[in-house]
Each structure stands twice: as C-alpha cells, then as structure tokens.
Amino acid sequence: MFRILVFCFFCVLSSGLFAQTRTLDSLRKLVAKRNLPDTVQILATLELAYEIRYTKPDSSILLVRKATAKARQLKFEKGIGTGLYVEGIWFSFKGKYQEALENYFKALDIYEKIKFEKGTARILNNIGIIYYYQKNYDKAEVFLNKSLVINQKIKNYSEIARTYNNLGRNLLEKNKPQEALENFRKAIALLKKYNISTDVSVYFCNVAEALYMLKQPDEALVNAEKSLEIARKVGNKRVEARACVVQGMIYLELNDIQKAQRFLEQGTPIARNLKFPEEHLLALEHSYKLYEKIKNYEKAYLFLKAFKAHSDSVVNDVNYKIILQREYEYNEQQRKLKNEYNEQQRKIERRNEIWIRYSLIAGVLLAFGLVFFAYRAFMVKAKAFKIIYQQQEELQVMNEELIQNQEEIITQRNFIEEQNTNLSSKNEQITQSITTALAIQKALLPFDNRVKQFLKEYFVLYQPRDIVSGDFYWIERVENKAVIVAADCTGHGVPGAFMSLVAINLLERVVLQQEVTVPALILHELHDLVRIALKQDEIENQSGMDLAVVMLDLPEEDYTEVTLHFAGAKRPLHYIDAHNPTAVGKIAGSRRAIGGFQNETISFEETSLTLPKGSTFYLGSDGLADQNNKQRKRLTDAPILEVLLQHYPSLPAQYEAIQVLLDAQMEGTTQRDDILFLGIKC
C-alpha cells in the first residue's frame, strides 16, 4: 500500500451538534451579548470554539474550557457533553489520541443519558476516527457503522455522507480501494441529492487516492485537481496541502518529473508551516522517492533523513525492509548478469565448434575455402570478445553504483540505530530523575513510627500513577490535638508532585507556625496562601487542590468516646459508628476547592462529630473511586464502602480487602489517577 500515513479526513465537515449554521461574526456578536440565558450563552460559545478549532486552536480550547466550567457549575449536561466533545477534537488535532478518546467516551455517556442521538452519532464517528489513527481498523469500522445506523435512523444525510467517507478511508487502509471508492461516491451522491452545502474538497481528494491505488492515474488526476481547486477556494489549507502531494504522487507515477516536483514543492511548505504532520510526512516520503528516481542522491538522502526524523518505529521497520529488499535486488541482479555472461560464453563456444567443423570439411575440398572460413571464424571470434569486454566494463560500472547505494543505505540504517540509542538513554535519565524525586517526596510524608505515638491504629493506601504523586497525606500533633489531612492536587506525575510540595510547605506554616488547628480556618488560610504562592491574581493559573481536614481531640488513657472536627474542600469524610456498624456515615465537604478562582460566597463549613471508642473514619482522594476497569466503568464509592463494612472493625483486613478490590478493577487496564485512601480507628 502506498500510504504510510493516515489522513485527518474529518477536519473540514460542518458540525451536526449545533442548532443552525452561523457566520463567525454573528457567533462572536451572540457570545458577546450579556442578557442571554446561561445555557444559550454556553452553547453559543462552544459553537464558536468549534468553528475556529483549526484556524485558531489555542483560542478555541480556552473558550471550550471556560464554557465547560460554567456548564458544570449549572449542571447543564448537554453543555458539559458538548464541551468534552469539542475538547476531544482539539486533543485529536494535537495528536493526543488517548486524551481525545477519554473525552469522547465521557461525552458519549452524557449524550446517551440525555438521549441526544445526533450528538451520539457524531461522537461514535469520531471514536472510530481515533481507532483509525491508531491503525486498529477493525475496531474503527465497528464504531463508524454504529454511527451510520443512528444517522440513517434520524435521516441526518450530511452525517451519513461523512460516515461513508470515513468508512472509505478505513477501507483504503485495509487495502480495499474498490470498496473504498464505492463509499466515497455514495457520500458525494448524497450531498448532491439533498443539496447539502459543505466543503467537498476532502471527498474528491479521497476519490483521487482510491483511483491512484486502482492504477487509474488519469481519472485520479482529475479528482485531485478538483479537490485542490475547491480547497483553495474555501481556504482549507490542510486539504490543499494533501491535494498538492497527491498530484505530485500521481505525476511521479506517470513519470512526469517536472510536474511531480512542482506539486510536491507546493504542498510541503503548507504542511510544514501549518503543522499538518501526516501531510508533511507524506510529502517528505514522495520527495525522497522523486529525487531517488532522478538519481539526485544528495537531495534524496536529505529528504529521507527528514522523513526518518518524523517517522515512528513502524516507519523505521518499513525502511529496514526496504534496505533488505534492495540488498536482495542487488544480489539478484549480480546473479542474472553472471548467468548472461556464462550463456554468452556457451554460445561463443558452440559457434566456434561449428566453424571449426566447417573449416575441416572445406580444407579437404579446397585450401582456399579453408583460408576463407578460418578468416571468417577469426573475425566472428574477435567481435564476440569485443562484446564480452564491453559487457564486462558495463558490469563493473553497475557493480560500483550498487556498492555505493549499499553504503548509503547502511549509513542511513546506522543513523537510525544511533537515534534510537540516544532516545533510550534520555528516557532512562528522565526516569532516574523522577525516581530520585520520589525519594524526596516520600521524605516529606509522615513517618509511621512518629504517627503511631498518638494514632495507635491506622492504614494508608498510597499509590502514585507516574512514580511521583499529586496526592499526599499530612499528619501532625499540636499539643493535645492531631491534625490529619488527605489532599488531591491538580495534575499527577511531576506537575502534581511539585504542587504537593508547595501544599505541604504551606500546611506546616498554617498549622505549626501560625498554630491554626480549626479545620475550616486551615482551609481558608491555605486557599489564600496558595493563591499568593502561585501568583494567581497576576497569571491565569488555576492550580490548587481538593482536600479533607480532620482535627482530632486526642483522648486520655481511659476514654469511651472521641470528638473530631471536619472540614472538606470537595472531599468528604466517611465513618463507621462502633455502636451501629451496619452502615457507613458520610459528611460531605464544601463545594469549593483550594486555590484558583473560586466562588467566594461559598464558605468552608466545619462539622463536629462525637464517636464511641472503636469507631473508624476514612479520608482520601477521588483516585480510588474513579479507577476504571477494562470496560471503562468506574469503581465508584459503593463497593468500597461495602468492603469496609464487611471487614469492620479490623483495619488490616479492610486494607487488604480494598487492595484486592483495586487489583481486580485494574486487571487488563492501566491506573487512571493517583490513589490515596486513609483509615483511622478512634
């Protein structure tokens, strides 16, 4: 198959999620209005972000996140789902396919819940596209066909055409160009039949590629020219770059070197300057083939080098197969030349035998005839030796050229191996640095032997996602009180770990230096200090954390009950009352986080709770409940609380049971977030 790269074939089609098509100017005016209902304002902002997603991607993502945050505040599910969908397109455009899939599946859950069929079909289509990018063509076909069924049900003809187009691209990658061509033509026929106004440049470009694969270059060229004309007219730079490269490929196939070079030189800078990686890689590949074909090995090497630098390990494997193929062709050519030489020698020997026989016969009859035929034989032999000598010289020249080509190929292979070695070394250095950072972070966490001086029985489930963690716990004794904190900082890995270091430093200042032990006051002070430390009034930095704080009145030796005081920033407290161990109680945290721009009208509320001796309480981040299984379903709080009740009052048994539950949930998948869960017995 001639394609190594995939084509971002959904980028130019109009949205099927919004109520109507508007111009950018009218959308901007609508978004600027202040008297609109909040839900209308959110959808208008998301529509504007969608329309500028490729022309101004950075502005688009800022609008999306602002509108989505507002939708979450209002619990406006359609707005949340649409925001996740448009952000998923942005992730896909940036090549972050895993993040795009996560957004799409979240949006899909919301759309199916509110029975928004048009949005459901669009997201199923985009999920199929992501699997297409990841070369999982069978899975891509499943999701695209699901999208097609829904669109046919609701008679959304523009989306039916779009899905036919995407199924066609998938079939091209499965090396089924004839079936792909039928799907492309179905899509174009639907657009014409229902007079659907849209940018059709991508459709004609796809038809051109299918015809190219079917060895119909003339018809392929007509469609590529039509695609280029439309793309330039509507300003679709991505399809313009693709159509130029496809025409260059076709002219290269037709051996029209001049035109092939002209179109490749038009498409390459567009793809490079506007950061279209698939089109840029395709242009580099065929530029290399062009200069190799005209034996300009210096330029061919430069383009091959650039192509290698942009390729992944799969492309490196393909190039290695090319090297093996060329070595095979070289050996095969050597064998053929040797056989031709031996055959020529045998012909000369047979011819000599004939002339010698005739000469002997003629010598018996006539001496003159002997001389004549001897002379004739000599001339023929001389001519034959001259031909052999010329062939030997040509063979020598060809051998030298083949040896030179082999040396160039070996040099390229060595360069690729050296680059792979360098990348492996850098990855090892980074991993070692992060592992060192883990040791530093662990040193800041509470030491078990010191904590057990005032908390006799407790457990901690602490499991970072990426070596270091954005979750942390903090336990200190202040006179006859114990302050216990479980926090979930923004992000995970290195960014989250940095945020946790800032938070631990600020907690020590508030509790140990300022001697603030009231949980609600700790949260207020911590919020103000985070905003100051991160200069959040000066820069757009929304980093912060969700956390729960418990201040425990340490009891005397003979005690029957314990009083604890709780305040939470978006994190709850769970507890089991020793006098009623049949249910898990819950105190919800305030709907406000620490750091960033928050609703200042919401205060951190504090709750006091008196529990009998032997009761247990629990704090943690959302990482445990949010962990998904291989069917992408969250664990949720319910099974965790059920396990706690089953194994109460033994904290070690509860810890082991939760670890088993987590291992079963994670089987066949990866950890989604940092995990922190504390259990403490009164």
Image: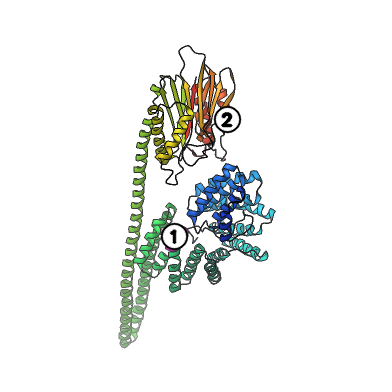
Question: Taking 359 as reference, is 399 above or below it?
Answer: above
* Type of amino acid under label 2: Pro
**Which mark is first along the chain, 2 or 1?**
1
Q: Nearer the viewer, residue 644 or 54?
A: 54
**Mark 1 and mark 2 residues within 8 Å of each other at the beta carbon:** no
Q: Which residue is mark 2?
A: 639
Asked if the stretch drawn in magenta spans residue 430, the answer is: no
Question: Taking 516 as reference, is 197 above or below it?
Answer: below
Identified at 33% across, 55% down, the residue is: 414
Q: List x then y, in percent, for residue 460.
A: 46, 27
> Is residue 677 in sight in this rendering?
no
Disc sitting over residue 281 in the figure: 1
Q: List x then y, in percent, for residue 127.
A: 56, 50
> Is residue 477 in sight in this rendering?
yes
Q: List x then y, in percent, for residue 481.
A: 44, 21
Q: Nearer the viewer, residue 57 or 148?
A: 57
Q: Which residues are magenta?
A: 277-285
